[in-house]
Image (spheres, rainbow, N blue to C red):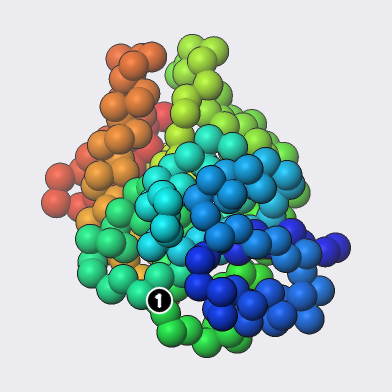
């Protein structure tokens, strides 16, 4: 299978290097130099997106938020930003990984393969789960409450998926962060607190039930 890779970056030299490398590795590579171009090109089937944060016309975080309304494929940020809050913001905007420049092409390729393999495992596992008025489609990665589809970012959905698959089991923030971002992910587990808050806010618009319980001093668990 030839994977479709969308590279969004205005650094022509870097883009050319990535295009040559991944074309040689048999990827179908497409290029976007602006956020608007990325939003247009991602409407075609895309398996993974490499996205720079420092875009000329639209901040990469905003591009990510808008792309998330169109696709659910993995989004990996490529950026020279190193501040902790930048990494947290990238995750909260719907990104799946954060690669700091300069980077190793072999490491980047390994992370891409890991994300693509994870996507395939999810697609093979056709499962539905019902919890007190909530329906979770683990294949489509969609959540419905009282028949209404909830607009979740991919990371928000990943938390619901992980916790709902382990009902009653308590996980701390570090365990949840590692599960949804990977053991070697760059970032901060404190972002899990903000993600859970956002999930609760979205669910509260459609139900008074609380599906995620805070276990004070420990972490979170899914309520049956």
Residue drawn 59% across and 37% down? 70
- State the image coordinates of residue 96 (x, y, percent, origin top left): 48, 57
Image quadrant where one finds the C terminus: top left
- State the image coordinates of residue 22 (x, y, percent, origin top left): 71, 76
Image quadrant where one finds the N terminus: bottom right
Q: Quadrant of residue 27?
A: bottom right
Q: Is residue 210 left or right of residue 48?
A: left
Q: For residue 20, say whether it is visible.
A: yes
Residue drawn 67% across and 41% down? 43
- State the image coordinates of residue 179 (x, y, percent, origin top left): 44, 59
Q: For residue 173, say whether it is visible.
A: no
- State the image coordinates of residue 195 (x, y, percent, origin top left): 31, 43
Nearer the observer, 23 or 11: 11
Q: Residues within 10 Å of mark 1 (few under 14, many from 20)?
A: some
Q: Is residue 18 above or below residue 34?
A: below
Residue closest to the far left:
217
Q: Is residue 114 left or right of residue 183?
A: right
Q: Quadrant of residue 212?
A: top left
Q: Is residue 25 above or below residue 164?
A: below
Q: Is residue 97 left or right of residue 221?
A: right
Nearer the observer, 73 or 222: 73
Nearer the observer, 159 or 20: 20
Residue drawn 36% across and 56% down? 90
Nearer the observer, 222 or 34: 34
Residue drawn 69% across and 55% down? 47
Q: How many marks?
A: 1
Q: Is residue 139 left or right of residue 133?
A: right
Question: Which residue is tagged 1?
Answer: 100
Residue closest to the far right:
1
Give the structural element (helix, strand or loop) at label 1: strand
């Amino acid at each position: 299978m030839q994977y479709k890779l969308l590279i969004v970056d205005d650094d022509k030299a870097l883009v050319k290097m990535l295009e040559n490398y991944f074309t040689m590795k048999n990827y179908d590579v497409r290029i976007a130099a602006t956020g608007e171009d990325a939003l247009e090109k991602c409407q075609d089937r895309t398996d993974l997106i490499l996205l720079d944060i420092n875009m000329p016309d639209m901040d990469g975080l905003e591009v990510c938020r808008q792309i998330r309304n169109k696709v659910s494929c993995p989004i990996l940020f490529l950026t020279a930003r190193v501040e902790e809050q930048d990494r947290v913001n990238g995750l909260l905007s719907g990104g799946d990984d954060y690669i700091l420049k300069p980077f190793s092409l072999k490491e980047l390729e390994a992370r891409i393969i890991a994300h693509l393999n994870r996507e395939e495992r999810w697609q093979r596992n056709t499962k539905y789960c019902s919890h007190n008025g909530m329906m979770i489609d683990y294949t489509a990665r969609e959540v419905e409450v009282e028949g209404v589809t909830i607009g979740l970012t991919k990371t928000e959905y990943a938390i619901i998926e992980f916790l709902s698959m382990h009902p009653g089991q308590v996980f701390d923030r570090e365990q949840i962060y590692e599960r949804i971002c990977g053991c070697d992910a760059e970032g901060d587990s404190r972002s899990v607190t903000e993600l859970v808050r956002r999930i609760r806010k979205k669910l509260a618009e459609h139900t008074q039930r609380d599906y995620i319980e805070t276990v004070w001093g420990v972490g979170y668990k899914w309520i049956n």
